[in-house]
Amino acid sequence: MYVAVKGGEKAIENSLDLVAEERRGDRDVPELTIEQIKSQMALAVDRVMTEGSIYDRDLAALAIKQAQGDIIEAVFLLRAYRTTLPRFGYSAPIDTAQMGIQRRISATYKDLPGGQILGPTYDYTHRLLDFDLTEENRNGPAAARTAPEAVNDGEIPHVTDLLNHEGLIQQEPETDEDAPIADLTRQPLAFPAGRDLRLQNLARGDEGFLLALGYSTQRGYGNNHPFVGEIRMGEVSVEIEPEELGFPIEIGEITVTECELVNQFAGTADSPPQFTRGYGLSFGKAERKAIAMGLVDRALRCRELGEEPTAPAQDEEFVLYHTDNVEASGFLQHLKLPHYVDFQSELELIRKLRAEYMARRQAAAE
Amino acid sequence: MPQPSSLKAGYNFAYLDEQTKRMIRRAILKAVAIPGYQVPFGSREMPLPYGWGTGGIQVTAGIIGPDDTLKVIDQGADDTTNAVSIRRFFANTAGVATTEQTEDATIIQTRHRIPETPLQAGQILVYQVPIPEPLRWLEPRETETRKMHALQEYGIMYVRLYEDISRYGHISTAYDYPVMVNGRYLMRPSPIPKFDNPKMDRNPALQLFGAGREKRIYAVPPYTSVKSLDFKDYPFQVQKWDDCCTLCGADDSFLDEIITDDAGGRMFVCSDSDYCAKRRDAGHSGPNPGEAATKKIGEAGDAA
Ligand SMILES: [Zn+2]
């Protein structure tokens, strides 16, 4: 009877067992390996690393396996692990001009220094289900015509730098290199948020949410006429500069996707007409995320550029408070927790209000 | 099967590292110094989801020591699943003693209730808070509500309560009922029923509030004034039941309604499971403790 209404230790244990059972699935089917997920579910790994905000393919693959492919749950697992890690230091800014390019496209110039490299992309696949993939083919498809080779001919200039030569694009404000950089994993969000804080927030933000917000700017809710100046994807080295050494040392390489948007801007009384910028960066191959991030970054720069914020994507508090899918998912799902007490309080109130309403009606009828 | 006990290895006492705990304790000290003021803190991602008590868990982790005895309740009961889950978390990561007895606990973490048994000096009550800002439903922007607190500009809340009275004849807030702390800060008591509000006033225990997702900590120090908002002609009132607890006969506790059949049958039992068990141990019993007392909705006087 009564106690049965409430859960307990036993129910939780049974639930954990059921999850483990479901995760494993049919035991006649071989168990997924971390290696398989890393190499064959690589784009899921990229998304989980980006939103989990830690670059570790093995941990991301483990999280995806543990979460049965639930990407937001996997992001949560990774984040919860990430907070327990000590910080040894901060890296120097990565230099994407020195990237080992796998893919690089510009929608603003037909040709440009460094060239266009299509690289691996779904863009020109026809979305026809490929039934050949239903059968495992140990030999795989015919080997790629030419093994993709990262292009690294030294520095490949950014499109925005090319525009900068002519003064056609807004200059990024000079920043003090030694100034502290905001970190929302250490300090809670505070407003107005600097661009460093905004970009960190967007980089960790849910791809679906940013996609929808970015899309809304294209449909007139804060339109800023974007062009993809450039998307580049490839490997960059990460350097740290230990204080005792005094010079940077390379600690590894990561794959990133960078998107630089070039946006129309009419200019104001104080500044001439020129292009403005939106910036997106993600771990791995998460191009959709990087573009969406760039659109929202540009939208959030409205105040800095003297534009009247009118659309949701330009609303800093609205955007930055709601990007985080770990926060959103937790709070949304807490609705499953018991609310007996609140509900009882509401029941009591609504019965009282109804009784009074009925009494009033009766009195009026007499 | 994944046992949480594996968590213990490789993690610090009470899960959080010592620097994080120090940061939390600093926020708590500031909160105690400015009763009712929401102190921003660097809330961490916890291995439990946001919205499921991460603020309360971080506060508890910040203050708990090996000699503490912890009680965790949700909806007043020790055996609700999330209370069990949080108690297990601390038993596994801190190895502290846990209890279901209100008077034996040094720290009580709670969601949605204040225990019926009066708290003592030296005890700490840690509330899990979903939305810390009392003005949030009236003003969604944090930049605005912070200004309103700074200027003690709370007229908007009184207007809301007044509108309730003019529309329904009552203030229609039954839980999470706003309070004024120490005559200065408007505070959200977390979604406790307004039945519990009077217990907050001049309570000998320290009351700490943790909102993990919203990254705020606030406090009511012992013996601090906590006043529920009201009007002279519409004084604050708590819920009352025509019924008493079916199991222990208590008529002074917050009662949960249990549906016993699909024909309108229901019974009422104490939401505070420890309080109810203690009364039964002391020989009290309800009108029909053996089997569920059933009562048809409508038979009870509906005006409470
Ligand atoms: Zn009882």
Image (cartoon, coloured by chain):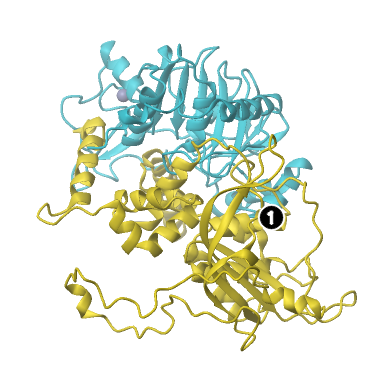
Chain colours: A yellow, B cyan
The residue sitting at 61% across, 60% down in the picture is A318
Mark 1 lies within 8 Å of ligand 1 (Cβ measured): no
Q: How many marks?
A: 1
Question: Which of these two is toward me, B20 or A282?
Answer: A282
Residue placed furthest toward the right: A270
The residue sitting at 32% across, 33% down in the picture is B80
Question: Which image quarter holds the C terminus of chain A?
Answer: bottom left
**Crowd rating for badge 1 (residues with CA inside 10 Å; few <14, some 14–19, many 20+):** some
Question: Which image quarter holds the N terminus of chain A?
Answer: top left
Q: Quadrant of ligand 1?
A: top left
Identify the residue position indicated by label 1 in the image.
A196
Residue A268 visible in the displayed image = yes
Side (left or right) of A312 relative to A12: right
Q: Chain of mark 1?
A: A
The residue sitting at 57% across, 69% down in the picture is A152
Quadrant location of residue B248? top left
Quadrant location of residue A70? bottom left
Return the x and y of residue B56 as percentages of the image width and height: 50, 32
Q: Assign a secondary structure to mark 1.
A: helix
Return the x and y of residue A247 as percentages of the image width and height: 70, 44
Return the x and y of residue A267 as percentages of the image width and height: 82, 79
Residue B270 visible in the displayed image = no
- Indicate the amino acid at tag 1: Asp
Question: Considering only vertical position in the picture, is A290 above or below B84?
Answer: below
